[in-house]
Every structure is written in structure tokens, then in C-alpha cells.
Amino acid sequence: MKIIIACVLTALLAFVLGLFLPWWSIAIAAFGVAALIPQKALKAFLSGFLGLFILWGGLAWWIDMNNQGILSKRIAELMQIPGKPFVLVLATGLIGGLVAGVAALSGSFLRQTK
């Protein structure tokens, strides 16, 4: 149950911080949630990763659907992956998830050393 609460809190806090701060504020959100909610290291990483993977992947998908995939098709062509704009949505989610997962892992380790 803690992992679900941590996922939701991480995603919500990252979304709110992302409105006012640069993209890397997701790490601050994940670190803070992991430092406040006691979890083992793997669960902390997973909660940060899943929270941001779903958030960023969902936002990227939403933006892609609202502009009929025009931007993602052009970026996919520039990156030489033509016809596969969905890969960009997955890559966006993975990057956000990894950043938040490592930050949450750091927050968990900080809590365990106290």
C-alpha cells in the first residue's frame, strides 16, 4: 500500500513542481517522497520510477494525441526511427522514470542511514 501512495504522491508533487520549476524538479519530488515515506530501497526505486513513468509517458501521449502525432513523427524522422513515434513516448517515460527512480533510491538510502 505504501508503494501506491508513494507513486501517487511522487507523480502529483512532480506535476506541481514541473509547473513552476525546470524538468529536473522531478528528482526533488521523488527524493522528498522517498525520504518521508519509509520503504526498502527496491520499493522506493519502483515507486519513483512508476510514478514518473506513468506521469511523463501519459503527458507525452496526451500531447501526441492532441496534435495528431505531427511533432512526434517529425522528431522520429530526425532520430532515424521513421514510422515509430510511439518509441518517443516510451523514451520520454523511461527518462523521467529513471531520474525519479534514482532520486527516490537516494532518498530511501538517506532515510536508512539515520
Image (spheres, rainbow, N blue to C red):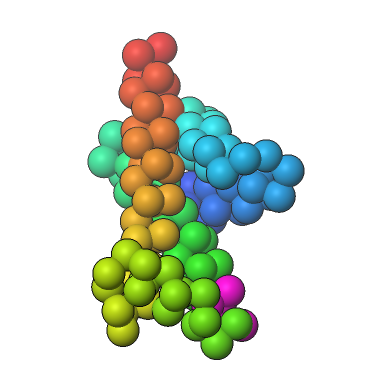
Q: Quadrant of residue 100?
A: top left
Asked whether residue 65 is drawn in magenta, I would say yes
Compared across the picture, whether 67 is left or right of 38 comes to right
Q: Is residue 64 visible?
A: yes
Q: Is residue 47 visible?
A: no
Compared across the picture, whether 32 is left or right of 34 comes to right
Which residue in the rendered view is the most extreme toward the bottom? 68
Q: Residue at x 67, y 39 (%)?
A: 21
Compared across the picture, whether 88 is left or right of 34 comes to left
Task: Please provide the residue range marked out in magenta.
Answer: 62-66
In the foreground, 80 or 36: 80
Q: Residue at x 58, y 38 (%)?
A: 25
Location of residue 64 with respect to 30 vertically, above or below: below
Chief SS of the magenta region: helix
In the foreground, 39 or 77: 77
Asked whether residue 29 is drawn in magenta, I would say no
Q: Position of residue 88 (x, y in %)?
A: 37, 68
Location of residue 50 with respect to 101 vertically, above or below: below
Q: Position of residue 10 (x, y in %)?
A: 53, 47
Locate the C terminus by quadrant.
Answer: top left
Q: Position of residue 102 (x, y in %)?
A: 35, 36
Q: Quadrant of residue 65?
A: bottom right
